[in-house]
Image (cartoon, grey):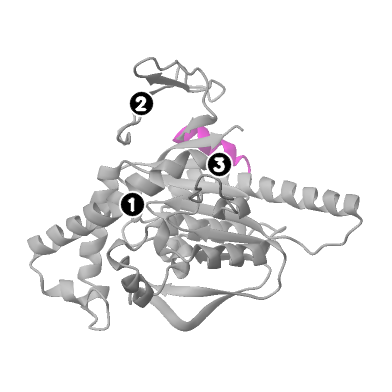
Amino acid sequence: MERPDRLPGEPRMILRDKAASVRDTPRLELVGAGAPEIQFSPYRVFTREQWAKLRADTPMTLEPEELEALSGIIDELSVEEVEMIYLPLSRLLNLYVAAAQKLHAVSSTFLGRTDCKVPFIIGVAGSVAVGKSTTARVLRALLARWPDHPRVDLITTDGFLYPNRELEARGLLERKGVPESFDTARLLNFLADVKSGKEHIEAPIYSHFHYDILSGQKTLIERPDILIVEGLNVLQPANVHRGSDAGPFVSDFIDFSIFIDADPALIEAWYVERFMRLRSTAFRDPASFFHRYVTLTHDNAIARALEIWRTINLKNLTENILPTRPRARLILRKVEDHSVSTVALRKL
């Protein structure tokens, strides 16, 4: 199966799954002028049904009415989706957290120190409108129900965007979401404080309603067991210039990373659907930044949504977000109805 979202200039990559058993490693073959054939993939790919079996005896801890609150604007969570995809994932993450806690204890014993606990950080990356927030919310709810780590917090990197006035001064307001529109130094300092075990840490809050940082409002993070960090460029490496020090990456602080993946054409359709849904709800409030779009005709509103997607979000996805996908520990591949069809788990 050839990748439908191959980036310009990339060699053609074909994924061949030679058998249904997950024990068989998918074969990656690079096809191009003089390109060698690669027999090995760092990922083990599971079908939906194969992944669901890894739930084992993990109990369903969410009630159907809770799923409605956890669902997104257009991606509604079903009991089946949670049972087949998110319960196995919460079991896997619980094992990772337990292993990290044991490693920290062993390291502290070796060093003769009695360090405070260090939060386990999970990063959730992917495009605008692909369902990152929904995944982050359901994982937070499920992980908080495991007895060994009941305190689970969630932040979005949107809070670390520069305020609109700063973006406008930098000529970035029309490119909000690209890596340079984030106050990366502030985000890195925040994550460093989390990993150092600092007891009270403040994170800025972003409002999609106002399309800006909320001045004077903060989220308080108080040494959680797990912190989920959701954002466009969670896996983005730093730009390194020849002869300079790379410095830390955001991903350096992340213990387990998840990439929410889908064909860009599907994400475009979801983006437009979400835009039109908001146009008939939240955008109607005169205080909304996007209230101006309420007066557009239906066809003009769709045209405007497509323009925003293709000139800003698709460009960011192609140039900045998709290239970070191979850095993820786990990739959830979604299909048209927003369900996850395959799960790829890194072996290395």
Q: Which residues are magenta?
A: 48-58
Q: Position of residue 46 (x, y in %)?
A: 49, 32
Q: Position of residue 171 (x, y in %)?
A: 30, 67
Q: Position of residue 196 (x, y in %)?
A: 72, 64
- Where's the C terminus, which quadrant? top right
Is residue 192 in view?
Answer: yes
Identify the residue under disc 2: 11
Task: Find residue 335 and report its image quarter.
Answer: top left
Amino acid type of disc 1?
Asn
Relative to 272, is 297 above or below? below
Q: Circle 3 — which element?
A: loop
Identify the residue under disc 3: 329
Frontmost residue, 8 versus 336: 8
Relative to 3, is 244 above or below? below
Determine the residue positioned at 13% across, 58% down.
Answer: 303
Frontmost residue, 310 versus 175: 175
Q: Position of residue 20 (x, y in %)?
A: 47, 21
Disc 1 vs disc 3: Cβ atoms closer than 8 Å? no
Task: Find residue 10 and report its image quarter.
Answer: top left
Relative to 92, is 76 above or below? below
Relative to 41, is 118 above or below? below
The number of callouts visible is: 3
Q: Which mark is residue 316?
A: 1
Q: Residues within 10 Å of mark 2 (few under 14, many from 20)?
A: some
Marked residue nearer the N-terminal end (2 or 3):
2
> How far is the residue under mark 1 from the one under mark 3?
21 Å
Q: Main secondary structure of the magenta part?
A: helix
Disc 2 vs disc 1: Cβ atoms closer than 8 Å? no
> How far is the residue under mark 2 from the one under mark 3?
23 Å
Left/right of residue 100 with respect to residue 214 in the rendered view: right
